Structures are given as C-alpha cells and as structure tokens.
Image (cartoon, helix red, strand yellow):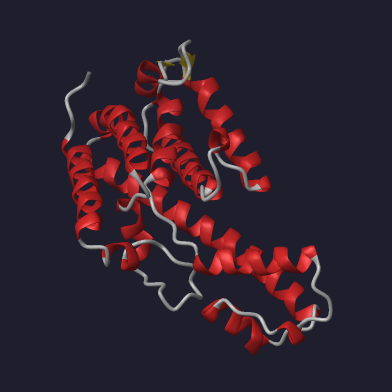
C-alpha cells in the first residue's frame, strides 16, 4: 500500500480528532453540521465544517478508508495543493447541490401547506415548535402529513460527512485509472473502476429519487450530496484534462 501523503494524512487526523471531540464535547454536534440555510442554526462555516463531522463509527470508517485508498494515489500524482483544492471544491459542491435540492423540496412542501389552508405564520410555528393547529387545515390527508414531514425534515436535518468530497475522488480515480480493479469488502469479485463508479452513482440517483438508503439500512443518506460531489469532480477533471495536462502524460497514467 502506498505511503500516506501529507494532505491525506492531515485530513484524516482532523476527521478523527473531531469525531472523538464530538463525543467528548457534544456542542460540536450542534454547531459544525450543515443546516438548511433558512434554519436559524445555519452558519457559513458549516459549508466546510460538515465535511469533518460523521454520524457514527461505520460512517467515518468507510469515508476515511476511501480517502486513504483513493486520495493517496491522487495526491501522489497531483501534489498536495491541487489535491486539497480538488477535495474541498468537491465537498463544497456536494453541500451546494444538497442545499439546492432541499430548497426545491422545502418550497414544494411549503406551497402545498399554504394551499391546504395554513398561513405562513402557522408554517413557521410548525418548523420552530413542531406543532400544527388542527384548525389550520381544511382536511388532514396522507398528502398533508407527507408535506408536513418533508418540510420538517428539510428544515431540521443536519448534513455531516466527507462523502461528497470522497465521491469527487472516485470520479478523479476513474478518469485517471479506469481499468484499475477495485477489491471491495462486500463484493467478492474485483470490479474495474470504470464500471463500479457509474453503478454506484446510478444507485445514488435512484435512491435519492425514492428516499431509500444503501442496502436498505434506513434513511438519512444525502444521496444528492454524493452526486453533487461527483458532478464537481467530473467538471474539474474534464477541465484539467482538456486544458492542463499534456496528452502523452495523461495517456501514460490513465490506462
């Protein structure tokens, strides 16, 4: 296994420190995750800080395993400055896409509740206090409950994890080493990167549409954040491949 590179090592250390720190200082779990931008708890620093927070041991383990596995190779090839730039741009892209998707979900649910008879003040009370005046709606239907659940979920859910940035690394790895065979813990047969990564992106897209989670282990996965990180990674790699790399050098390392 390739020796850890400097930036990967530092990112890994910060993630581990904050994971342990959040267990010792629970306040970190309040101020560092990323909130929906209309939530009073939202802060601009959360666009970055959420990338160093994780929801559990398995969450941080898989993200850091991928960081070391793919990030070390990429930093070795690019150098630390370009790797750090790429990593954080992908993480910011993931957060931006997730917030954009949340905005459309929020507005759709908000419009439904208003049309159902609630006032803007009553919706605000729902968001801040979690209560609904039963006289505020004309008819309590499953669709109404779904809208209430959706707007409350978007408003109150906190986004954590480096997964968006990690997905960007996966895209970069595919660009550079498409035929590399990945030996994954849960798949007994090695799979070429150019097949595995598109498959997992398709899975995230379909899961994001129907709200499911990987292997049916429950909700709470920001699938569109994953796709956002992958999209930014793709755009960066496409741009760099087109404008910054010597074609012969690319061919040498890309196959």
Q: How many marks?
A: 0
* Residue extending farthest front: 134
18 on left or right of 233: left
Residue 74 vs residue 224, the one in the foreground: 224
116 on left or right of 196: right
Please give the name of the residue rendered at 35% of the width and 19% of the height, measured from the top-left corner: 253
* Residue extending farthest top: 189
Q: Position of residue 218 (x, y in %)?
A: 55, 44
Please give the name of the residue rendered at 44% of the width and 43% of the height, measured from the top-left corner: 236
Quadrant housing residue 144: bottom right
Q: Is residue 186 above or below residue 112?
A: above
Please give the name of the residue rendered at 22% of the width and 36% of the height, measured from the top-left corner: 79
* Residue extending farthest right: 139
249 on left or right of 148: left
Q: Position of residue 183 (x, y in %)?
A: 40, 16
Q: Position of residue 171 (x, y in %)?
A: 46, 33
47 on left or right of 224: left
Residue 226 vs residue 219, the one in the foreground: 219
Please give the name of the residue rendered at 31% of the width and 27% of the height, measured from the top-left corner: 69
Task: Tell me the quadrant of the picture where the C terminus can be found.
Answer: top left
Residue 79 vs residue 64, the one in the foreground: 64
Q: Is residue 215 above or below residue 144?
A: above
Quadrant housing residue 137: bottom right
Task: Tell me the quadrant of the picture where the N terminus can be found.
Answer: top left
Q: Position of residue 91 (x, y in %)?
A: 39, 50
């Amino acid at each position: 296994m390739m020796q850890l590179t400097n930036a990967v090592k530092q990112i890994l250390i910060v993630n581990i420190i904050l994971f342990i720190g959040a267990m010792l200082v629970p306040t970190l779990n309040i101020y560092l995750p990323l909130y929906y931008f209309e939530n009073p708890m939202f802060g601009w620093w959360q666009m970055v800080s959420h990338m160093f927070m994780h929801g559990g041991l398995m969450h941080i383990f898989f993200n850091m395993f991928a960081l070391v596995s793919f990030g070390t190779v990429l930093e070795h090839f690019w150098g630390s400055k370009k790797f750090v730039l790429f990593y954080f741009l992908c993480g910011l892209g993931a957060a931006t896409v997730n917030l954009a998707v949340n905005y459309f979900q929020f507005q759709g649910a908000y419009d439904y509740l208003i049309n159902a008879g609630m006032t803007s003040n009553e919706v605000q009370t729902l968001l801040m206090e979690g209560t609904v005046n039963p006289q505020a709606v004309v008819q309590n239907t499953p669709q109404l409950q779904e809208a209430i659940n959706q707007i409350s979920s978007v408003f109150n859910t906190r986004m954590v994890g480096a997964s968006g940035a990690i997905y960007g690394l996966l895209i970069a790895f595919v660009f550079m080493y498409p035929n590399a065979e990945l030996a994954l813990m849960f798949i007994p047969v090695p799979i070429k990167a150019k097949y595995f990564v598109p498959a997992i992106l398709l899975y995230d897209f379909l899961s994001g549409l129907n709200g499911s989670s990987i292997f049916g282990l429950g909700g709470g996965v920001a699938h569109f954040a994953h796709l956002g990180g992958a999209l930014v990674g793709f755009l960066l790699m496409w741009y760099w491949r087109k404008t910054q790399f010597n074609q012969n050098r690319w061919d040498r390392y890309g196959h």
